[in-house]
Amino acid sequence: MSSETDEYEVIVVGGGPGGLSSALYTTRLNHETALVDRGGGRAAMMVDTHNVIGVPEEVSGNEFLQTAKEQLEHYGTDLYQDVVTDISHTGSEQPRFEVETTDRTLYADSVVLSTGFTDGRPEPPLPRTGRGLHYCLHCDGYMFRGESAYVMGHDDSAAYVAMILLNFADSVDILLRGNEPTWSGETDELVRAHPVEIVESDVERMFKDEDDPQWLGGFEFENGERREYFGGFAMYGSEYNNDLAADLGCEINDDGTVAVDEDGKTTVDGVYAVGDLTPGNNQIPIAMGKGAKAGIAIHMQLRTYPKSLDELDGTTEAATADD
């Protein structure tokens, strides 16, 4: 850490791409900034980094995040490997927020929440994430050009991802895993009109690719079928990590995201939310853009200059008297 203070102008909670970008901007815009990160998260799970211009594909999620943290340390952000357990109003104008973590208490004028969401995981047997099991079609659809693919799930989102995946893959199956479809009647008619096969039987075991044992080869099903797949997507919903936002009184949307304006401002003054915790596509470049916009908006609120003429007159008189 660059200092020993427990008071900051900005505290960012969460070390994903959105939170890291917010911290980078507020630090470089000359505001005392701390970032509290518990570790892990969706970006850390990435085997390869896709769709981030200037970042090679072979860079893993952990490598990407570590490079960002090194940048923050270089500019003077204080980094805490810790878990935020509570955020509350101090009752005073400055600092406005008390941030409780497992190991310490910090204070901030503004707070940025970048706590993201957790993907629902199907029951095993499953391949490794990034090696046959994927969660983001816009990130990884390119990988499935000319391949056979599956979508695990049984709701409307699973059906629509399967149909969209036809833009890339040669063949697409929906694996219900023994569940009844919960998608709407309209969706049922639509998906069955597409060249998508619906497999009702549950998976009994998986097998690896013979040429590359790190990758999935396919599944064997309880009904005795054996199907080969390059990989596929799990669609079992998401749980948004919005507890801190809700406890602060921020408005929560029906889908669990935190309601924000175009700059990431929540409905609570001084509290911002960025990245996957907010509405929109869940992509690294988009999260980074949201983080940057929030960082600039915070700077506009916290910066000392320019002052009004009345403020400058008072400052000039006070400075002259002190001299």
Image: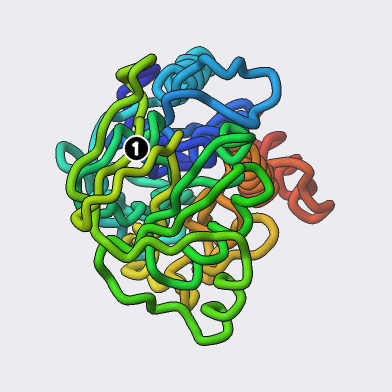
Q: Nearer the viewer, residue 64 or 125?
A: 125
- The vertical placement of 37 against 158, above or below, is above
Count up the numbered dots: 1
Q: Is residue 295 visible?
A: no
Residue lying at the far bottom in this picture: please name it. 185
Query: Which residue corresponds to mark 1?
Result: 218
What coloring was used for the rendering? rainbow
Residue 262, located in which quarter of the rendered image? bottom right
- Amino acid found under the numbered disc labelled 1: Gly
Q: Quadrant of the C terminus?
A: top right
Left or right of residue 126: residue 48 = right
> Mark 1, residues whose alpha carbon is within 10 Å: few (<14), some, or many (≥20)?
many
Q: Is residue 138 visible?
A: yes
Disc 1 secondary structure class: strand
Q: Report x, y in % for residue 288.
A: 61, 38
Q: Report x, y in % for residue 144.
A: 57, 36
Which residue does the image show at 62% across and 72% down from the upper left?
Answer: 193
Q: Nearer the viewer, residue 139 or 53?
A: 139
Which residue does the image show at 43% across and 64% down from the upper left?
Answer: 198
- The vertical placement of 162 against 83, above or below, is below
Q: Report x, y in % for residue 130.
A: 40, 31
Which residue does the image show at 47% across and 33% down from the upper left?
Answer: 33
Residue 252, located in which quarter of the rendered image? bottom left
Q: Quadrant of the N terminus?
A: top left
Left or right of residue 124: residue 95 = right
Which residue does the image show at 51% across and 40% down from the upper left?
Answer: 148
Q: Report x, y in % for residue 191.
A: 57, 70
Q: Nearer the viewer, residue 81 or 289?
A: 289
Residue 229, located in which quarter of the rendered image? top left
Left or right of residue 313: residue 119 = left
Residue lying at the far front in this picture: please name it. 224
